[in-house]
């Protein structure tokens, strides 16, 4: 099912040095990447983006404590993110107003406590059941909290939201949190701490029983565990980490609006975790990075970015339910098994066919947006290094022909070829 | 053998809709007794186990475990009071390995509860006990194999292993040897005999060889009623049993 | 007072009937296929947009019939080439698929029709006041909506109770495993149920788009409410959906129009919370601000205390 489970089993036999090295290097790589990233990304926009990635990584990992580990599909996880953020924001404003001595580094903890508090309250009513009932309750709670932002404008700050100044609190280490880079490092450190804790949580008795309850709640009962309690504890922990992410979020943005508790935010974290792959610890990390990147960069390149986003998600659900990380993992496994040697050409062929199809599809979508949404469709349109007139027939015919051709090649030739290449290996 | 009552059923009934499946069962099972329940297919043996273990709620009647009422309690509460059961249809954590299945079965009884501040791997006691069990079940070689990939007999062995792991005071085993080869079954019976020297066993079994070999007492369940509950010799001699069961069913 | 109550009741009934049209299809789909179709309100939106655009060429009356059929066919295609593929992975991926679909449909609508609301108007033939109450004219179109909704309910009811297809659907609403036992081609049945359900949603959109609004956010706005109706009404129960729709419609309309708060209730008993106390915010909260929350409160309470809903025969 997932990598860590296999590892835990293996480690039980003899814990050697090499196992520790093997287990630690991904973390070391993560630390190095996180520390070096600001050398590459120096613009304010970029620093904000990578800070958001850190926040989203925590948020998506906390989401996967529910969906991946416990099998609980939540449509309202942003509630804990947003409310945690609001708690932290109120604390920040309190510090600003009174000079209270809480350092900025610990502000996310206030968010975590907020998540914990609301996790306890809403978890108690929603984890009695799993499955679709749980999903619907989470949706209902999400909508209720969203609606209550209209009722309690004092707490939520109304339409405009609430502002704060992250330079008001003191710093534990005397760091100036004016520059985005320093804020990024704060996010990175918290993200690493949170990720390590969430990783370890999977290996605790609760983490194991969460998997057990996900797979077979009945059997879990017959070894002494109440599925409801297991779900409840997991839920509360997940809400706590979501609150932590929310607390960090307000440090980065210095503003929070009621959108952070809403459906869109809840949907975003679901998309992130699922696109990355819920069966793997690193899946949500990959998903979070990708989603924030697309949200931040794609949106400035094309109007169609939300459409691409939706299509990507639908494609993952349909063709790669194991997520992008899962796909990569499978490829690495099959490469190790030596399957690549005999199927390399077939793979390359099939992938190229699919890639051509996707590029042609992008061309069609971009042209459609140009023709239908641009204020002047006649204006020449840059597309893949060429400039075309989107209102003339030719580019459209070319795109559709390429799409149809690529599909035909893929289904009629490339895929059968790939299948044969893989089968021949099994026979041998 | 002590005379304390481990499990006492009084006037137990269970209806599914209008079908009366358990029709007033009274049964006293003494502590440390090996009690085997026999009866034709569909007699209600598994249903009886489901009632005792809390998987189903009784329509009427009471169940006492060491003098404490357990009817109406959820399965995990019954389990924590020292009653553990296996299933006729294998019921495991299919995605988990043999080792993981056994450890999950051990966690609660070793007092780890919902702990999220310690790692499963560093619980030596759990690991050792799990390894011991695997050794005994001949599953050591397969310890990293997911349950879903085991052979049927291995799954059955693991099912029993997960049931006995916690060292419960009362064990309910539902046809533990079904589907096993002769030697596998003999080994299983030997294991069951070993582990039940100081606990109470209630077992459903069709193989009469096993039954008379293992049982201290035998109860015969026919159409949801216990028609006899006695020592093996007395049951063998019981005319009603011979007519209702032994005479008609040949195993 | 009497005036407010009468109009609130009428408008609540109207809104409820719109909700019913929107959600009855989902009740069928959910009850039978177990698919909580997140994109259901998207088909409602497509219904409104299709009817608007078709109406420009054919007039409202033709569009009233054509738009639901067109949307139903799209629904069939979605089932055939999307859902069926995902079905093998289980219910959660199915739910996620429809979730993603809702995004895609909204973006496509924005692409083709733009971000601004459509000028989708009441057809001329129905653009007159039907009667007047307390000096206020009551538009004929609203009555038309009621008539469409009621005939839809009656039609569905007869279809389910009186026809062979209906009996098959009914059988599988209570026992999904039974359909295959009846020897019918299950995937085929599912596809047509999905098409039919989405078509019903589209019909709701054809009239709802006029009555409420036709804009890209309409699906997102109505989506969660549809779930409330289906869950509160009970799995697979058309009558339950009707009752739940009206209940929610009336409840929300009343909360919006009477503008009460707990303080009003307190005054009846001669009690008031001091304005500076901690509970004052809640005590003086007027019902218009509570209104959006009510359906979801109902949903959560229902799921906690009676997960099978008002009229459901089995649990979700
Ligand atoms: N959940 C249920 N709903 C309805 N009927 C049930 C249910 N569970 C069991 N039954 C019925 O109760 C009767 C007894 O079943 P049970 O499984 O207890 O028999 P058994 O004695 O264990 O038989 P076997 O030797 O085949 O295991 C059967 O007729 C069965 O069909
Ligand atoms: Mg049985």
Image (tube, coloured by chain):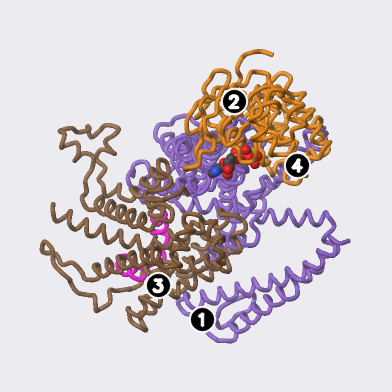
Chain colours: A purple, B orange, C brown
Q: How far is mark 3 from mark 4, CA to CA?
A: 62 Å
Asked if A4 appears above or below C59 in the picture, the reply is above
**Residue A175: x and y, percent?**
57, 37
CA distance separating discs 2 and 1:
75 Å
The residue at which mark 1 appears reads as A379
Secondary structure found at label 1: loop
Residues marked 3 and 4 touching at CB (< 8 Å): no
**Secondary element at tag 2:** helix
The answer to whether residue A159 is visible is yes
Question: Which residue does the numbered mark 2 point to in the structure image?
Answer: B80
Residue wearing tag 3: C49
Q: Which residue is pictured at 37% across the width and 78% down the height? A: C63
Q: Which residue is mark 4?
A: B179
Residue drawn 72% across the image and 23% down it:
B233
**For the residues carrying marks 3 and 4, which lies nearer the camera in this image?**
4
Measure the alpha-carbon separation of dots 2 and 4.
Answer: 30 Å
Q: Chain of mark 2?
A: B
Q: CA distance from mark 1 to mark 4?
A: 76 Å
Q: Quadrant of ligand 2?
A: top right
Residue A405 occupies which quadrant of the picture? bottom right
Q: Are marks 3 and 4 on the same chain?
A: no
Q: Quadrant of the C terminus of chain B?
A: top right
C222 falls in the magenta region: yes
């Amino acid at each position: 099912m997932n990598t860590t489970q296999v590892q835990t089993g293996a480690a039980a036999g003899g814990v050697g040095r090499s196992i520790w090295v093997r287990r630690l290097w991904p973390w070391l790589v993560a630390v190095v990447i996180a520390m070096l990233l600001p050398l590459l990304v120096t613009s304010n926009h970029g620093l904000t983006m990578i800070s958001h990635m850190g926040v989203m990584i925590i948020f998506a990992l906390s989401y996967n404590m529910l969906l991946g580990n416990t099998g609980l599909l939540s449509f309202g996880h942003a509630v804990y993110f947003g409310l945690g953020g609001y708690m932290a924001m109120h604390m920040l404003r309190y510090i600003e107003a009174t000079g209270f001595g809480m350092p900025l580094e610990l502000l996310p903890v206030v968010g975590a406590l907020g998540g914990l508090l609301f996790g306890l309250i809403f978890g108690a009513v929603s984890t009695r059941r799993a499955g679709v009932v749980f999903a619907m309750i989470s949706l209902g709670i999400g909508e209720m909290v969203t609606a209550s932002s209209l009722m309690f404008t004092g707490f939520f700050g109304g339409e405009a939201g609430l502002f704060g100044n992250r330079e008001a609190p003191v710093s534990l280490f005397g760091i100036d949190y004016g520059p985005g880079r320093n804020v990024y490092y704060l996010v990175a450190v918290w993200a690493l701490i949170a990720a390590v804790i969430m990783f370890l949580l999977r290996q605790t008795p609760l983490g194991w029983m969460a998997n057990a309850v996900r797979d077979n709640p009945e059997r879990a009962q017959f070894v002494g565990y109440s599925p409801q309690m297991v779900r409840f504890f997991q839920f509360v922990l997940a809400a706590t980490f979501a609150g932590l992410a929310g607390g960090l979020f307000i440090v980065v943005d210095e503003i929070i609006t009621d959108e952070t508790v809403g459906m869109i935010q809840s949907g975003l974290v679901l998309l992130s975790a699922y696109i990355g792959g819920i069966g793997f610890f690193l899946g949500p990390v990959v998903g979070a990075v990708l989603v924030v990147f697309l949200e931040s960069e794609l949106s400035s390149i094309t109007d169609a970015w939300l459409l691409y986003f939706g299509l990507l998600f639908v494609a993952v659900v349909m063709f790669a339910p194991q997520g992008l990380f899962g796909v990569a993992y499978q490829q690495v496994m099959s490469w190790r098994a030596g399957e690549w040697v005999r199927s390399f050409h077939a793979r390359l062929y099939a992938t190229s066919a699919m890639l051509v199809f996707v590029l042609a599809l992008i061309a069609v979508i971009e042209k459609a947006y140009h023709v239908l949404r641009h204020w002047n469709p006649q204006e020449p349109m840059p597309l893949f290094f060429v400039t075309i007139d989107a209102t003339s027939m030719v580019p459209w015919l070319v795109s559709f022909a390429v799409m149809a051709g690529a599909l035909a090649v893929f289904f009629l030739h490339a895929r059968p070829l790939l299948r044969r290449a893989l089968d021949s290996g099994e026979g041998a | 053998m002590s005379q304390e009552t481990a499990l006492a059923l009084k006037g137990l009934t269970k209806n599914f809709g209008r079908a009366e499946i358990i029709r007033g069962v009274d049964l006293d099972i003494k502590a440390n007794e090996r009690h085997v329940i026999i009866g034709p297919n569909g007699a209600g043996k598994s249903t009886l186990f489901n009632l005792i273990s809390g998987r189903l709620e009784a329509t009427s009647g009471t169940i006492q475990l060491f003098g404490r009422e357990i009817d109406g309690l959820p399965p995990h509460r019954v389990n924590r009071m020292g009653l553990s059961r296996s299933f006729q249809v294998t019921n495991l954590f299919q995605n988990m390995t043999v080792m993981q299945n056994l450890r999950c079965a051990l966690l609660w009884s070793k007092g780890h509860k919902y702990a999220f501040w310690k790692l499963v791997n560093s619980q030596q006691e759990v690991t050792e006990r799990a390894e011991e069990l695997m050794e005994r079940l001949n599953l050591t070689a397969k310890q990293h194999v997911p349950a879903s990939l085991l052979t049927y007999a291995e799954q059955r062995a693991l099912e029993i292993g997960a049931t006995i792991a916690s060292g419960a005071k009362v064990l309910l085993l539902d046809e533990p040897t079904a589907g096993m080869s002769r030697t596998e079954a003999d080994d299983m019976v030997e294991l069951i005999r070993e582990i039940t020297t100081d606990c109470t066993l209630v077992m459903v079994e069709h193989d009469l060889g096993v039954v008379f070999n293992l049982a201290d007492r035998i109860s015969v369940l026919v159409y949801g009623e216990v028609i006899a509950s006695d020592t093996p010799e007395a049951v063998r001699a019981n005319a009603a049993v011979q007519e209702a069961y032994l005479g008609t069913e040949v195993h | 007072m009497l005036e407010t109550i009468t109009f609130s009741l009428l408008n609540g009934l109207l809104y409820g009937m719109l909700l019913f049209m929107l959600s009855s299809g989902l009740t069928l789909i959910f009850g039978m296929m177990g698919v909580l179709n997140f994109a259901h309100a998207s088909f409602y939106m497509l219904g409104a947009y299709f009817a608007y655009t078709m109406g420009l060429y054919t007039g409202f009356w033709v569009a009233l019939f054509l738009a639901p059929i067109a949307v139903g066919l799209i629904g069939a295609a979605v089932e055939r080439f999307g859902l069926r593929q995902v079905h093998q992975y289980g219910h959660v991926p199915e739910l996620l698929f429809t979730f993603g679909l809702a995004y895609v449909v909204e973006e496509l609508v924005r692409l083709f029709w733009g971000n601004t609301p459509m000028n989708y108007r009441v057809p001329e033939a129905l653009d007159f006041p039907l009667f007047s109450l307390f000096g206020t004219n009551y538009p004929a179109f609203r009555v038309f909506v009621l008539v469409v909704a009621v005939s839809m309910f009656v039609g569905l009811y007869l279809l389910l109770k009186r026809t062979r297809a209906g009996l098959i659907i009914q059988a599988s609403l209570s026992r999904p495993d039974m359909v295959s036992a009846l020897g019918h081609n299950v995937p085929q049945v599912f596809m047509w149920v999905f098409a039919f359900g989405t078509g019903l949603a589209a019909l709701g959109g054809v009239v709802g788009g006029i009555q409420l609004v036709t804009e890209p956010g309409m699906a997102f706005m109505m989506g969660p409410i549809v779930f409330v109706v289906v869950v509160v009404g009970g799995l697979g129960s058309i009558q339950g959906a009707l009752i739940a729709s009206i209940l929610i419609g009336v409840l929300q309309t009343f909360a919006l129009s009477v503008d009460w708060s707990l303080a009003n209730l307190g005054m009846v008993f001669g009690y008031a919370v001091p304005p500076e106390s901690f509970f004052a915010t809640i005590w003086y909260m007027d019902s218009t601000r509570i209104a959006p929350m009510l359906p979801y409160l109902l949903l959560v309470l229902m799921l906690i205390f009676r997960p099978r809903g008002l009229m459901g025969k089995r649990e979700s």
